[in-house]
Amino acid sequence: MNQVELDRVTLTLGERTVLADASLAIRAGEFIGVLGPNGAGKTTLMRAILGLLPPSAGTLRVFGRPPQRGDHSIGYLPQVRTVLPDLRVRGLDFIGASLHGQRWGLPSLTRHDRSMIEATLESVGARDLARRPLSEMSGGERQRLLLAQALIGQPKLLLLDEPLISLDARHQEVAIDVVRKVCRERGITVLFSAHELNQLLGTLDRVLYLGNGRAVLGTVDEVITAPVLSRLYGTDIEVVRAAGHIFVMSRGRDVETSAHQHDHNHGDEHEHHH
Amino acid sequence: MFQYDFIQNAFAAAGIVAVVSGIVGYFLVMRGQTFAGHALSHIGFAGATGAGLIGLAPLWGLIGFTLAAGIAMGVLSERISNRDVAIGVVLALALGFGLLFLHYYTSFATQATALLFGNVLAVDHGMIATLAVLGVITLVALAAIMRPLIFASLQPELAEAKGVPLRFVSTAFLAVVALAVSECAQIVGVLLVFTLMVGPPAAAQRLTTGLWSGLALAALLALAEAWLGITVAYYTDWPVSFCIACLSALGYFAALAAPAWQTRRRNADHANESA
């Protein structure tokens, strides 16, 4: 069965059309790398799958039915924007707050909840984070904590929005390895958005490339080509393969690297005008 | 000193208000909304003086204005509540209106000082009963929204995805803050609500990492500072609110210093082990 299915879907944010008339299907157990320039709609697509943004046209189906807000079968790791830096909450309570966090009343953790959190932390190799306050964790440790949180409750689909941002190269590799291992073991479908294709090359099954209101889903060889990417970026793109790496270039510049640099200044509002 | 009725009353009233302030303030600090709490108390000042003008008890004007302002802030959340400038402008405007109402209010000076800086030694039995009822309402309302409130404070994007109504939760919380601010202003005055609502919870967050231990410590610190403040005031004849403000600042800065001291000790231990 297809886990996520778009049938001529259009997504709009205010006046802006983020995705126009897109059709694609993601199969169970696939690891999908979601790529594309900033503002191409990676976050927007994930929010639509979560049921937070109804399509303005077309049909979106998740697990064969319309997306439902608060679906427990979906694990979500939002792009980190709002972790308060000085928060002295320990990892266990941080994740505990998200467990049944939508219910009214006082927070409480049963012994079962507690052991589930600890087991999940263990599975991403972060058992010790349960007791440590958030304010003393490094960027990599926080990301691991968030990943563990996304995995709680046996999700069938995992949406990871830029989980590599703010990690150094070594921690990025570790994070990818952890996701790959856990998701392969449990047969979880993954949408993993990133800026950089090369790190995901050995892991992903197919690429979902977004840009210019379009979405193209396919193998790396099908999607990462000059004609396809030129259409998505709206400019002449060259694809250079060297030593097992793929470089996507626009007029001699690596678009992924430049997207990274812009990201620190503009957030996700950046658009390409080349 | 407990042979005096006014001291007994002051201890009872300050005790109720300190516990409520410490607990509600804990979430105010967690959400980084302390400035909004401060603004609510200033808006309450206009309400209190306005109520005096039309012959109502200041407390009801305080509650009416802070509740209305808290709910308005929650509903307009994205546009206003986290914008310091907008809040600052509204806050100053409210104080200005408070002054205008005072201008037409006969018992100008004493009333103004009591509203601005509190007058816990003048509390009577009726006020204690009112504060107790309000305190229970405040804490019950907070308990009802506590779980989604914590989730929404720590991870708003995820909470939204999991079905937490963010705007409703933040509006309900600001209404709870409005009630707590109104109560707190009865003890330490609108200008000094930080002493009980921010100082103790902020200190508690430095010293603990667990939720329940943090809440308990915030309430205990607020209670200790309020009661100790009254005691010191009794023996020195200094204003109560001044004493509480000093203790609150002392508690906060001591808590700031404590972790640094712990880290140094830990490092020293490591150095000894490796030597």
Image (cartoon, rainbow, N blue to C red):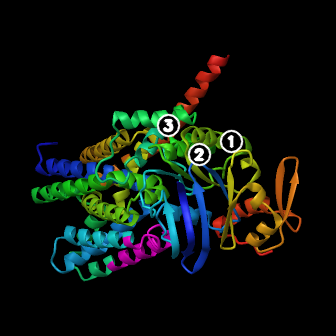
Query: Residue tagged by mark 3?
Result: A120
For the residues beneath circles 3 and 1, the answer to whether they share a chain is yes
Q: Indicate the position of residue A19 as horizontal and vertical percent values.
A: 61, 72
- Image marks 2 and 3: residues in contact by CB distance under 8 Å: no
Q: Which residues are magenta?
A: B75-97
At numbered mark 3, what does the secondary structure look like: helix, strand or loop? helix
Which numbered disc covers residue A143? 2
The answer to whether one can see residue B239 in this image is no
**Image coordinates for residue A252, horizontal then vertical, percent:** 89, 65
- Report which quarter residue B172 is drawn in: bottom left
Precedes in sequence: disc 2 or disc 3: 3
Q: Is residue B180 left or right of residue A67?
A: left
- Does the residue at mark 1 contact the one at mark 2 (Cβ under 8 Å)? yes
Q: Nearer the viewer, mark 2 or mark 3?
A: 3
Q: Using the numbered discs, state the Cα–Cα distance from disc 2 to disc 3 in whole angstroms.
A: 14 Å
Q: Position of residue A260 (x, y in %)?
A: 74, 59
Q: Disc 1 is attached to a residue of which chain?
A: A
Q: Quadrant of the C terminus of chain A?
A: bottom right
| Residue drawn at x 43%, y 36% as measured from the top left | A116
Q: Chain of mark 3?
A: A
- Disc 2 is attached to a residue of which chain? A
Vertical arrangement, residue B52 with respect to residue A65, above or below: below
The disc labelled 2 sits on which kind of residue? Gln
Q: Is residue B86 magenta?
A: yes
The residue at which mark 1 appears reads as: A171
Q: Nearer the viewer, residue A235 or B68?
A: A235
Answer whether residue B63 is visible to the viewer in this image.
yes
